[in-house]
Amino acid sequence: MAKITKATIEAKGIEIAVQTTPAREDYFSLTDIARFQNPEAPASVINHWMRLHNTIEYLGLWEELHNPDFIPDEFNRFLNASGYNAFTLSPQKWISQTNAVGIVSRSGRYGGTFAHSDIAIKFAAWLSVELELYIVKDYQRLKNDEGRRLQLKWDAKRELSKANYRIHTDAIKAHLIPENLTPAQINFTYASEVDMLNVALFGKTAKQWRDENPDVQGNIRDGANIYQLIVLVNMESMNAELIKQGMSQRERLQYLRNMVVEQMNSLINSAAVERLNEKLSTNRPRLLDDSSEDEDGNIPSD
């Protein structure tokens, strides 16, 4: 079962539960927010807000934008009835009859009525502009904290990559580079191994990639996705071991190519890696910065 992560924000002395779905959508507890106005009966506050014409109009528009399974006929029926004094609408009724996803009702210890952050902030603004501002500010604090934690994990990954890279280059130096080679010859040996990894992972050398992408900044590895970066780190370790075993480069290329196919198939089906990929899909730090060879395999400094 997909995991929902839980957090808490605070506004005007009220703790508000925040649940994040596997799709990285944040849902706030309307029940907690409603306690700002009525600590004893928050459900009545929510029900009163939901019966308003403007609220139903907003909820319907949100669903039409985000939910392909939304039932517009039921939405229009609620919207037309909202002008009558006898009209009532609960979250459960709205969800069941319109197939809404912006508001959810959860049971159990951490239950209550939850709404997507867009809707929850709209509800808070209806209660109090001041409350809305405090919620927005602490929500920003929560997201900034999450970003910092993610950066720390990524920095740790980079440090591991540095250590792993040293294992790879030490194996090349010890087993593939004879004594008395010129710097150019040594550099060629490193470049040959780097390009062997590039071919195994990307299907082409660094030069081939540059020739195909003359207007793209960076190198072949800068555009790698999280799956390729994970496999690359594993390839460097494995290549170091294969070098120590005396396997030829031709044999190692075939072995590593098979390894790439196997590991990529496994990683693509990993929910944990998919979540990480979504977080890092924009403005991703370079995994190899300051830690490994450039695309041409220049000699690493000791």
Image (cartoon, grey):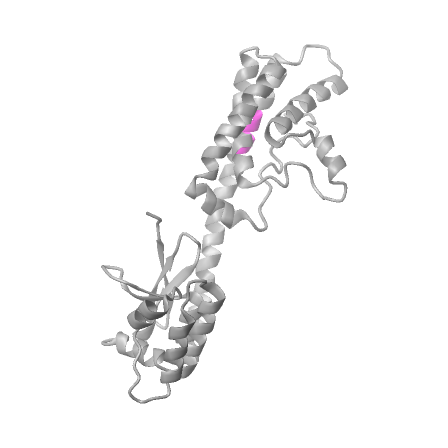
Whether residue 14 is visible here, answered yes or no, is no
Q: In the figure, residue 299 lies in which quadrant?
A: top right
Horizontal side of residue 150 vs 209, given as left or right: left
The residue sitting at the front extreme is: 73
Magenta stretch, overall SS: helix
Given residues 63 and 2, the one toward you in this image is: 63
Which residue is located at x 60 percent, y 20 percent?
253
Residue 254 pos. (x, y %)? 58, 20
Q: Quadrant of the C terminus?
A: top right
Question: Does the magenta-highlighted stretch encompass residue 163?
Answer: yes
Which residue is located at x 71 percent, y 18 percent?
186
Number of numbered markers: 0
Residue 142 pos. (x, y %)? 43, 59
Horizontal side of residue 58 vs 210, given as left or right: left
Residue 93 pos. (x, y %)? 30, 72
Residue 227 pos. (x, y %)? 52, 38
Q: Is residue 84 above or below residue 33?
A: below
Which residue is located at x 66 percent, y 26 percent?
195
Given residues 242 and 101, the one toward you in this image is: 101
Q: Which residues are magenta?
A: 161-166
Question: Does the magenta-highlighted stretch encompass residue 33?
Answer: no
Q: Is residue 131 above or below residue 235?
A: below
Q: Is residue 244 above or below residue 119?
A: above
Given residues 49 and 91, the one toward you in this image is: 91
Which residue is located at x 54 percent, y 20 percent?
255
Whether residue 90 is visible here, answered yes or no, is yes
